[in-house]
Image (spheres, rainbow, N blue to C red):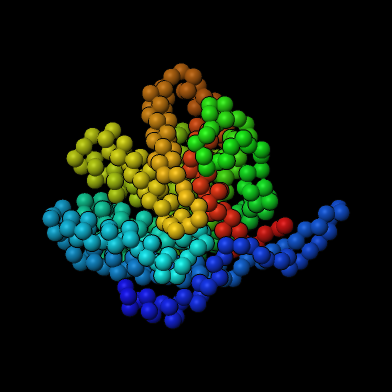
Amino acid sequence: MNAFNIASSRLLTPLFLNKLKVDNREPCITVEIAGAKYGFLLPHLDFWIQLAVILLINATACLIMATVIFKFILPYRKTATAYLMGFGMIIPLALYFPYWLIDVFDIQNIMIRFGLYTPTIMTFHCLEAMYGTSPFGAEASLQNYWLYNCLVTEVQFSPLLQRPKQMSTSDLLARSNHVIRQLLGLCLLYSLTFPYGFQPFDHRHFPNTLDHDFSDIFHLHHLANNLVTAILFYFILSFGQSAVGLIWNVLGYKTNLVMDNPFLESSSPSDFWGRRWNKIVQSLLKKGVYKPVRQSYSKNVASLATFVGSGLLHEYVWSFYFWRDTYRPQHGKLLLFFLWTGVVMLMEHFVGGWRICSWIKRNFPVPVKSALVVLTALPMAHLFTGDLIEGGFFYDFQVGLPLIV
């Protein structure tokens, strides 16, 4: 790594001289409508150059680790050799990688750090390799395994043909249209909310604190602010991972979407969290935690381990988002949030068969049922989004977006 540090200092470090912590853009166009002036901000090119470099370095690191896993773990899965290579080398290196890269380039923009997906991908894929829970087709060849590990999106494999599914022209056009719509929605929501610090409604407490009492978490303004930031985070995830997936789509490979309209089509909390919200992370948790634990323990134990694993994953990710940053998140809140979602889903299991619940399922329109599902998460959503607001996650992304001001 010392050799890479020297080479990067000469070749790549100059690309990261702009720390992108202050949005000092000036409108390129200004118009006056009904006596009010509006301007249009162009995205900062340095943001996208830095993000592209980070994604390329991530992809390279993932390819190297994937090769080691394919050669030295897959043939020996469920043996001491596989566990030694996985737990002793691959996973520690993957977990250390973001901190090292942040220090090498002195990356300060939180959203650029958001692009450091190597530990998330390789830690779980290494667990899959050790316990035999990778998807069909991914391990059929080294090329397939590279495709499976390279980017933070899931390539679809044909179980029968043992190769990646091909993207048709119509599918590519539909996916391109999806990415454009997500970008437009993201830019519009940013333009509407960033003047208010992404909290458009008055609130008693800062969203990143634990000072909220019972009346606070059910206050209409608190729920509304949490809904705004949840939708904002939805657009960031949906656009970001769909845009990265578009790279594979252009090359002819089908990929999975990260979101499946969770705010408008969810029928239950388990449907929201298990099948519609951030399906890539859900897939990683299912194959990297739930299935390996389920091989030795009950379904309930495996489910509990998955929720705890989700909380620990996000706590870890938060740790390098704010690594050596002036903002210091209070750890434990994310674990608490995901335990809350687990409790909600457990309650669904016990009360889902009640007559009133069955009547709601049969008679309420899907968007209304989705709204009720979302309401089960909103009171505690500040445990997740509070640090993103106060720590500058949302603010650091706006420099890369075209905005109306």
Query: As displayed, is residue 346 above or below residue 46?
Result: above
| Quadrant assignment, res 307 | top left
Q: At 67% across and 47% down in the image, what residue appears? A: 196
Seen in the image, is 27 located left or right of residue 71?
right
Place of residue 194 in the rendered image (x, y in percent of width and height, measured from the top left): 65, 52
From where the camera sits, is residue 250 visible?
no
* Extreme residue toward the top, this view: 355
Near-viewer residue (175 or 6): 6
The furthest residue to the right = 35
Judge left or right: residue 10 versus residue 136.
Answer: right
Residue at image position (63%, 66%) is 43
**Where is 288 relative to 56, above or below?**
above
Residue at 44% from the left image edge and 80% from the top image edge? 11
Residue 39: % across, % down: 75, 61
* Residue at 24% across, 42% down: 293
* Residue nearer the viewer, 381 or 376: 381
- State the residue lying farthest toward the left: 80
State whether residue 389 appears in this view.
Answer: yes
Residue 275 percent across, percent down from the top left: 42, 42
